[in-house]
Image (spheres, rainbow, N blue to C red):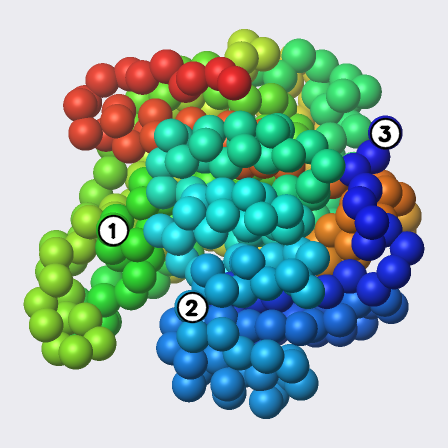
C-alpha cells in the first residue's frame, strides 16, 4: 500500500525551510502549479529574507526559526532547501512531528547522517520522504536504464564518466559554501548526483580508490576573512561495481577547455555514450563502424516533475522514484568511501545498506 494520511484528498499545506535559488526557481513554482496545494509558511536564514520570499510568492506566514515551522499544526509537508549541514536535523524533526519531507540534493553531511535519515523515514512509513534529484540525466534515464537492462551493451565491462564544470582557476573567487566541509560535508562537487544516476543504470559500487586536489587552499569569505578551503576542486576515482564492471570517474572544476560532461559504457556487445549537457544518447553494437544517435521516446523523456511526484506520493497515487532515501543513503556511503580513500591513500569498500 502506498503511503497516505488524512490529507490525501484535501489541500496539502507546504512549508519551506530554506529558500535559496533552487527553492525559488523550482520548488515554490512547482508546488504553486499543482492543484490542491497551499504554500503556508517559510523560514529562511533570517526573518527579513523570509519575509522577502513570502512577499514574492504570496506565502502566508514567516517564521524566525525553522523549528517553529516543523511544529506548526497547519503544515503537512516540509520542503528543505538549506545547505547540507542542516538536512539531517531538520528531516528528523519534521518526521518526528508528522510531516512529509522533500529534502534538497546532497542528502546529508556524511554516511552516518544519511543512515539516520533513512532509518527515521523507515520508522515513519506513513509519511513520504523524498530527495530532490539532479535534473541533468532525468530525460535520458529511462532509455539508458532500459538499454543496459535489455543487454544492448552485453556484459558491461568498463565505464568512463567525466563531469566537467571546468574553467581556469580563479584564486580571487570568494569562498562558497561548497568549498566548506562544515557546510557541505563530504559532498564533493557534483559527484553524489552523478553517482545517483549511475546507480540507476549500472548498480552501486563495491570498492573505490580516489585521489583529490584542492587548487586554491585559502579564499576570502563574504566578510573578507581568509578561510581554509576544505572541499576538493578535482577528484579522480577508480571503482569496482558490484555487477563486476570497472569505472573511472572524474569530477572537476579545474579542467578548463575540457570536453563536455559525458559517460561511456563499454560492454561485450556494444558501447553507449551519453552527452549529458545535450541530453543525447549514442550507441553502437558489434559490427558497427561508428556510433549512431539513439532516439529517446517522448514518453521516456520524463524531465522535472519532483513536486508533482511528491504530492502524488502523499496522496497515495504513486511511489517515489526520484529520489528515495535509500538511494540517497547509498550515494552518501559512496561519498564517504571516496573521502576516506583520498585521505588514507588506499582502496576502501563501499558499505552496503
Q: Nearer the viewer, residue 157 or 301?
A: 301
Residue in the picture at 26% in, 49% down: 181
Comparing marks 2 and 1, which lies closer to the viewer? 2
Question: Which of the two discs, 2 and 3, sits closer to the camera?
Answer: 2
Task: List the single residue furthest toward the front.
Answer: 73
Q: Position of residue 236 (x, y in %)?
A: 33, 35
Rounded to the nearest angstrom, the CA distance separating label 2 from label 3 is 35 Å
Where residue 203 sits in the image (x, y, percent)? 60, 22
Q: Is 119 on the left or on the right of 213, as rendered?
A: right
**Sequence-first disc among 2 and 3:** 3
Residue 148's place in the image compared with 219, above or below, is above
Q: Nearer the viewer, mark 1 or mark 3?
A: 3
Q: Secondary structure at mark 1?
A: helix
Q: Which mark is residue 1?
A: 3
- Front position in the image: 105 or 72: 72
Q: Nearer the viewer, residue 289 or 259?
A: 259
In the shown orientation, is residue 143 left or right of residue 218?
Answer: right
Q: x, y percentage for residue 278?
A: 65, 56
Mark 3, secondary structure of its residue:
loop
**Is residue 275 positioned above or below 236 on the image?**
below
Q: Kindly report the distance in space between the C-alpha atoms of the residues bearing marks 1 and 3.
A: 39 Å
- Residue occupying the point 9% across, 67% down: 226
Q: Which residue is mark 2?
A: 65
User: Dot 1 surroundings within 10 Å: few (below 14), some, or many (20 or more)?
Assistant: some
Circle number at residue 182:
1
What residue do we see at 25% from left, 51% from top? 182
Amino acid at each position: 500500500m502506498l503511503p497516505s494520511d488524512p490529507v490525501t484528498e484535501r489541500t496539502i499545506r507546504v512549508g519551506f525551510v530554506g529558500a535559496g535559488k533552487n527553492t525559488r526557481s523550482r520548488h515554490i513554482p512547482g508546488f504553486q502549479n499543482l492543484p490542491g496545494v497551499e504554500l503556508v509558511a517559510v523560514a529562511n536564514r533570517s526573518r527579513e529574507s523570509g519575509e522577502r520570499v513570502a512577499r514574492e510568492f504570496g506565502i502566508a506566514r514567516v517564521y524566525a526559526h525553522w523549528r517553529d515551522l516543523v511544529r506548526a499544526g497547519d503544515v503537512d509537508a516540509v520542503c528543505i532547501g538549506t545547505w547540507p549541514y542542516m538536512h539531517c536535523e531538520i528531516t528528523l524533526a519534521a518526521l518526528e512531528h508528522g510531516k512529509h519531507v522533500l529534502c534538497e540534493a546532497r542528502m546529508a553531511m556524511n554516511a552516518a547522517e544519511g543512515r539516520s535519515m533513512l532509518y527515521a523515514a523507515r520508522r515513519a512509513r506513513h509519511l513520504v520522504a523524498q530527495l530532490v534529484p539532479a535534473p541533468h540525466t532525468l530525460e535520458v534515464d529511462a532509455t539508458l536504464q532500459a538499454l543496459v537492462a535489455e543487454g544492448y551493451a552485453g556484459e558491461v565491462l568498463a565505464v568512463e564518466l567525466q563531469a566537467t564544470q571546468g574553467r581556469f582557476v580563479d584564486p580571487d573567487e570568494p569562498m562558497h559554501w561548497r568549498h566548506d566541509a562544515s557546510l557541505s560535508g563530504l559532498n564533493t562537487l557534483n559527484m553524489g548526483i552523478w553517482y545517483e544516476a549511475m546507480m540507476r543504470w549500472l548498480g552501486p559500487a563495491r570498492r573505490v580508490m580516489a585521489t583529490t586536489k584542492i587548487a586554491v587552499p585559502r579564499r576570502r569569505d563574504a566578510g573578507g576573512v581568509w578561510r581554509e578551503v576544505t572541499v576538493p576542486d578535482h577528484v579522480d576515482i577508480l571503482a569496482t561495481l558490484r555487477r563486476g564492471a570497472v569505472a573511472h570517474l572524474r569530477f572537476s572544476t579545474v579542467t578548463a577547455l575540457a570536453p563536455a560532461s559525458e559517460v561511456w559504457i563499454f560492454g561485450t556487445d556494444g558501447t553507449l555514450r551519453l552527452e549529458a549537457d545535450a541530453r543525447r544518447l549514442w550507441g553502437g553494437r558489434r559490427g558497427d563502424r561508428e556510433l549512431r544517435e539513439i532516439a529517446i521516446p517522448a514518453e521516456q523523456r520524463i524531465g522535472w516533475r519532483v513536486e508533482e511526484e511528491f504530492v502524488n506520493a502523499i496522496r497515495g497515487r504513486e511511489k517515489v522514484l526520484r529520489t528515495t532515501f535509500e538511494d540517497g543513503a547509498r550515494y552518501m556511503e559512496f561519498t564517504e568511501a571516496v573521502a576516506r580513500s583520498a585521505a588514507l591513500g588506499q582502496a576502501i569498500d563501499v558499505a552496503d545498506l
